[in-house]
Amino acid sequence: MQARRSVLFLVSSLGFGLSGCGSAVEGVAEEAVPTNDLVQRVKDPTELARMQQHLDSLYDTKDVRHHFQSPDGDDIDCVDLYRQPALRQPGMESHVIQFAPSTFPKELDEAPTGPAVADARQPAQAELAFSLDATGAVQRCPQGTIPILRVTLDTLKRFKSLEDFRSKVPSHLSGDALRAGSTALHQYAAYRQTVDNLGAESALNVWNPAVEVASEFSLSQIWVARGSGADTETVEGGWQNYRNLYGDNNSRLFIYFTPDNYGSGGCYNLTCAGFVQTDTSIVIGSSFTNYSASGGAQHEIKLFWFKDGTAGNWWLRVGTTWVGYYPRTKFDANGIADKGGRVTFGGEIINNQTAGRHTHTDMGSGAFAAQGWQQAAYQRQIQYVDTANVYRSPASLSAITTDSFCYDSSAVANDTSAGGWGRYFYFGGSGYNANCT
């Protein structure tokens, strides 16, 4: 069902949408995923010059203190901590870097109290890809720097404008979808709870789904959001397969934020002046050294978005590592400056349509939710933090499903055994098939 990558070098372990229930449907033969469909869309030389200016504004080459390549060939620049993109923008000159949250949520009041039981579902942890030097040592960025996945002009050229590059819905996607038909451009299989919160956490198994068209993506993530219409603001993160953005077919750790309802004010990863990274080891935008296999080993990451008090920043934790934060000043009181208003967990794809039909783009593993363990994607240990700074297990998750013939989710289950899965669900699907057209 999916192309698998060889296991590469392993490094330190790590540990985040919308869905509904639908019956599994008969699949069809999958088409080969194209590898030569990375086309240039930049609209004119003036826009190309703007794109280059944007890249030049992110960081200066003189602030790169070390460089290495990942096993996949990604260029990683180790940039001076105080000269990273988020701190170079006007208004951030006097920003004092916070190196850890000042508060921490209290343990879940509903923690399982039953005896530990043997559980055959024991996923391994997915790990980010790093490189080895000539001595066999893992290359990392030195203290006082942060790792940044280098973005080139060739990447930005795949978008019509700089605004398109920064948007989660570039204009070439919405235009193609409108011409092709009425099938929804963004499709979801996820669960949401509307509740005031200071963050959300879950563990996600990591897959390398087949994505038919380079302009589409497939992801599993956590959303924390508040506001409506133009006031919608979010922080998002998880894993994503998106050839237009990354240039290959590998799923990668990603983050995204919007302060303007998915306009051009936000961006992915560290590709604009948004996220302040403090950790020296985790490369946001990096691929993984291992992925879950159908019928085989399951690998997962655990992600946590945490608001450091109502007056604090939005922190990201990957596994047990606090990676960095979005400053509170990026948001406003109608959005998530003080708190979140809803948490969502699950999968999302873009269906850019091909020849008037739904594309063969997998969500999760490409398996529907009913196939369960070792087959379908999942999120487990789903929690949020209430405004009293206490972990809570969401009790009223509502399914959000775009088209259950294309992608679906199981009902939310609750494993209360000690060390168990907590609240969890499976989700996914194959895209185009006899009933998803």
Image (tube, rainbow, N blue to C red):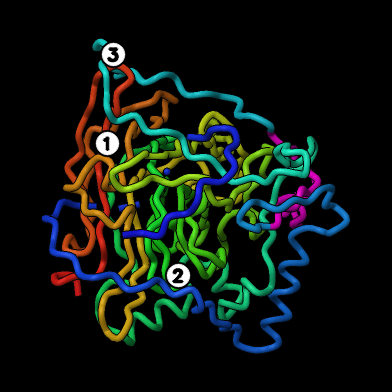
First of labels 2, 3 by sequence position: 3
Say if 255 sits above or below 186 in the image.
Answer: above
Q: Residues within 10 Å of mark 1 (few under 14, many from 20)?
A: many
Q: Nearer the viewer, mark 2 or mark 1?
A: 1
Amino acid tagged 2: Val
Cα gap from disc 2 to disc 3, whole angstroms: 45 Å
Instruction: Name the secondary structure under disc 2.
Output: loop
Q: Which residues are magenta?
A: 75-98
Q: Is residue 213 left or right of residue 254?
A: left
Q: Specify whether 102 is left or right of 217.
A: right
80 in magenta: yes
Name the residue beneath numbered marker 3: 116
**Residue sitting at x 57%, y 38%:** 10
The residue labelled by disc 2 is 169
Which residue shows up at 66% across the image and 55% down it? 149
Look at the picture and state if 244 lies above or below 67.
below
Query: Are the residues tagged 3 and 1 within 8 Å (C-beta)?
Result: no
Q: Is residue 197 left or right of residue 418?
A: right
N-terminal of the pair, mark 3 or mark 1, is 3
Nearer to us: label 2 or label 3: 3
**Image coordinates for residue 26, horizontal then vertical, percent:** 13, 64
Estimate the x, y position of residue 124 in percent, counting from the top left.
42, 33
For the point 64% across and 60% down, the residue is 271
Dividing the image into 4 quarters, which one contains the N terminus? bottom left
